[in-house]
Image (cartoon, helix red, strand yellow):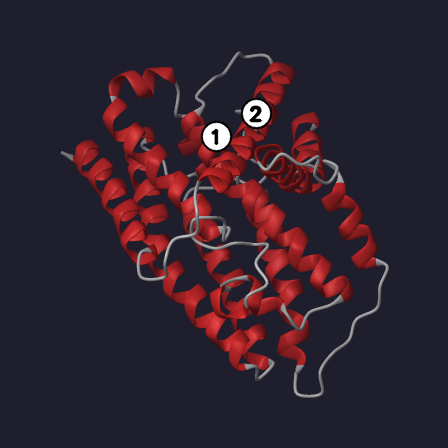
Amino acid sequence: MTDIIIHCAVALLFPPLLLGVIGKTKAVFAGRVGAPYFQPYYDLIKLFRKGSVFSDTTTWVFRAGPVVTLSAILIAVLLIPLGRHAAPLSFSGDLVLFTYLFGLSRFFTTIAALDTGSSFEGMGAAREVTFSCLAEPTLFFALITLARLSKSLSLSTILTHATSATWFASGASMLLLVAALFITLLAENSRIPFDDPNTHLELTMIHEVMVLDHSGPAFGMILYGAALKLFVLGAVFINVALPVSTGIALADWVIFIAGMLVLAVVIGTVESVMARLRMVRIPQLLVGATILSAFAMMLVLR
């Protein structure tokens, strides 16, 4: 019961801090002080205290988009083990539900953007769906590879099975998976080099252009859902890349949180030293990530 309470507390309270660490890291590279680490929390509180404005052209789909998206990701959080502890919800085949929850959240975000009738948001929705179609096979191949190594179809077993012994036995496959999952992490969360979450140029936006008409609590749910999605995929990455288990519950939680903070610093560093890729280059990088995860799967299944 204690692990479940800690799991829920960390999953609900920690994600916005990742965005704060990323922003602070980028500010350091730019030679600026930057916003406080807790600025994302202040922004969310401000948005949830505001009212919402809805266009006359929108329907219930536009209002349901943020709610369904956030709900799907919240359920996905319960399927992921954190700190080498089993997830609160775990059953054989839950990896399929996990991937479809992300598909559901993306679907409602996309149709909510299309429901506005805006050509800009339609353009962003088309780009989002196109790039997601190229990123999802990477995640599928990675989960299949980890399932084969753990001989299980449950995420709790799959992600906690990755230990130092697994790395010694299948080091090449695990290294390929880490590279592929990191690329997918950046792509699925619309980070540089795939997208710039801070851009104000409509013609270059992907994810941000889809939420231009949202305001108040609805926009707050979208921002919180984005932070939560970064946390979930980051947790998957950390479980694979940092196979450390001390056997002490508190120590494992501390290692997990420290690993997530380091991951946020790494993402901020990548965004500081790289420029955004041209649109025609993004599919090439996503296909490359899929090839890496496919090679990892072939090495395990051979």
Residue 151 in which image quadrant: top left
Residue annotated with mark 1 = 238
At numbered mark 1, what does the secondary structure look like: helix, strand or loop?
helix
**Which residue of the protein is positioned furthest toward the front in this rendering?**
31
Image x and y of residue 250, in percent: 65, 17
Location of residue 2 by image quarter: top right
Identified at 63% across, 57% down, the residue is 71
The structure residue drawn at horizontal position 48% and vertical position 65%, both measured from the top left corner, is: 204
Instruction: Using the image as rendered, state which of residue 152 and residue 164 is in the foreground.
Output: 164
Q: In front: 160, or 293?
A: 293
Tell me whether circle 2 and circle 1 mark residues in contact (CB < 8 Å).
yes
Which quadrant would residue 292 be assigned to in this image? top left
The quarter of the image holding the N terminus is top right
Q: Amino acid at mark 2?
A: Phe
Q: Residue furthest left?
A: 302
Give the tally of numbered discs.
2
- Pointer 2: what residue? 256
Q: Position of residue 99 (x, y in %)?
A: 44, 52
Is 24 placed left or right of 52 in the picture? left
Label 2 SS: helix
Q: Say which quadrant the C terminus sits in.
A: top left
